[in-house]
Image: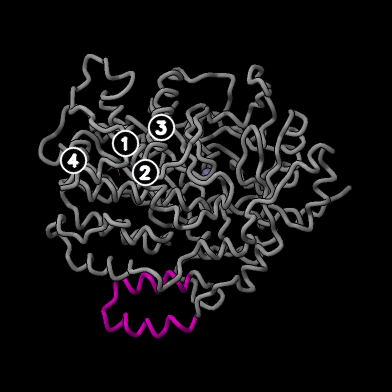
Amino acid sequence: MRLSLLLLCPSLAIAAPHDATLHDHDLDSANTRPWRALSDIITDKIWSSPEKQAALETHVDSPRVLRTPDSRLLALYGGDTVLRFTIRNADEAAALAEATGVLSLDVWEFNAEWVDIRLAIDAVSSLLHLLPLSLQDAHVPLLQDSSLAQAVLDSYPLPLDTPLHHDLHSYSHTPKTAPHESPSQSKGGHPFFKDYQPLSVIHPWMSLMSSMFTTHVRRINIGMSFEGRDIPALRVGVHPTNKEKAETPRKTILVVGGSHAREWISTSTVNYLAWSLIHSYGRDRETTRLLEQFDFVFVPTLNPDGYVYSWETDRLWRKNRQPTSLPFCHGIDLDRTFSFQWNGESHPSGPCSESFAGEAPFEGVEAQRFAEWATNETQNNNVEFVSFIDLHSYSQQVLYPYSYTCRDDPPALEDLEELAIGLAKAIRISRKGRQYQVTSACEGNVFMSKNHKDRVVLPRIESSGGSMLDYFYHELKIKYSFQIKLRDTGSYGFLLPKENIIPTGEEIVSALHYLSHFMLGEIGIMSGAPNAEPGEPLSKPAFGEMEESLEL
Ligand SMILES: *[C@@H]1O[C@H](CO)[C@@H](O)[C@H](O)[C@H]1NC(C)=O
Ligand SMILES: [Zn+2]
């Protein structure tokens, strides 16, 4: 049987009309780009005068806020569904791997037990006919409470339902003065985190952080994206080299998000972590001490072109926006394009695949810039990266190297496992914390038999080489490297409702505190190390609550 490729591949079906490279300033047709209109409004409100704001408020009512998906969203997503297939044996996994590879299906997430696949509703029965009989009733739709198009719509902010704009606006007029007097955000969280934010808000917000909190925040630039956007980062810490050249390299914890564009929760969480440390400095003894010991570098949008595209054109865009050898398929998967164990040659599905690794290692521009920047930091700028955290969504997992194979164990396996378990525990015991699984990032390679004794190596649903995790672990020798897949476990997947932004941020703040104490030798295996600093005893196990309890 021959299947229609277009029917089965939602990203193909929508790629053609949006083929042109889109820059912010190219988009003047607000009617056809509702999200652009929203982000313009938000940005204008932040930076413009009160008079202009008043004028805008009347203007806002005309592109009326949508409560149900409009025709454009229905055209893009109305015909699609996301199915979770339960995998019970190696044959089923192999068949699914083949089908998704050959047909370039959009695999949302997978592990040893299930695969979530987005596809056209019309194509479901054709696909099922290609699969083993046993799989034909082993699937359930995700997003049971809502259509895909509705969930897409719900993930965007409503223009007028948050006081964010006024809050940031007031910040922008009090730069460089008394950071401790910034408005209180502790109750209910900062309004910036009530919604996902577009790049046009995130980047000014980062600049604002660095100009307001000059004692401990600097805005730095990782490099430039394919389409020419900055990839900014915040370096948070009380850097000793500001005054005197430090002899020993500055210990630095590197946190990155947004390498996959549609995983918005990863971007908001990086910003949340940054904000948590930034505003606790000088108020919370514990955080102040951590920022004296470490620098934290936060990169919220490693893939700015893809992020913008996911806001303005296709909410479910994953890759970057580079052209490929096929004119109607854009994008390289930034988490498959790193040089360590890059395996793009053997990847069967090519440029239309959501996990396309490029034609050669480091063809993905943003990945290459990031690697160059990190290498340069360690070689020329007296930085020692002691931990690397790559945030993704979804499935609530703390993953340690390697990704590319389960056959080789990483040299630091035991320590990695111990810390990963600690991170998952810190997440779980934080207020409203969720349960995160701990496993190797290779797990999709392996089918565990029911008794968990036999490991059966399978063809993976997606390729697993060239990952950012393996690269930073192996090439940059950052021993404590992890990938964390954030909420949820499939109810909404990438379309995680915004009410999760703050709770997800909080649980990962808890993990970051745990990580820092571990690195200081105050918890776990390193606590017996001869050069460990004694530090203050940890009175409370619930790190997530530390901030509140220590705030005076
Ligand atoms: C490497 O670091 C030097 C010194 O800070 C800087 O001037 C240069 O631009 C950096 N290069 C890259 C690729 O980041
Ligand atoms: Zn991802």
Label 3 is placed on what type of residue? Lys
Q: Nearer the viewer, residue 135 or 371?
A: 135
Q: Which residue is mark 2?
A: 431
Element type at mark 3:
helix
Q: Which residue is mark 3?
A: 425
Do the residues bearing badges 1 and 3 touch, measured as CB atoms within 8 Å? Answer: no
Q: Is residue 523 left or right of residue 68?
A: left
Label 1 is placed on what type of residue? Ala
Residue 160 in the image: x percent, y percent? 40, 74
Do the residues bearing badges 1 and 2 touch, measured as CB atoms within 8 Å? Answer: yes
Label 4 is placed on what type of residue? Thr
Toward which corner of the image does residue 116 lie, by quadrant?
top right
Mark carried by residue 542: 1
Of the numbered discs 1 and 4, the one sitting upstream in the chain is 4
Q: Distance of mark 1 from mark 4, alpha carbons?
A: 18 Å
Q: Which residues are magenta?
A: 36-63
Q: Distance of mark 4 from mark 3, alpha carbons?
A: 23 Å
Toward which corner of the image does residue 358 lie, by quadrant?
top right
Q: Is residue 364 at least partly visible in the picture?
A: no
Reply above or below: 143 against 238. below
Element type at mark 2:
loop
Q: Which residue is mark 4?
A: 288
Q: Nearer the viewer, residue 199 or 419?
A: 419
Q: Distance of mark 2 from mark 3, alpha carbons?
A: 12 Å
Element type at mark 1:
loop
Q: Distance of mark 1 from mark 2, alpha carbons?
A: 8 Å
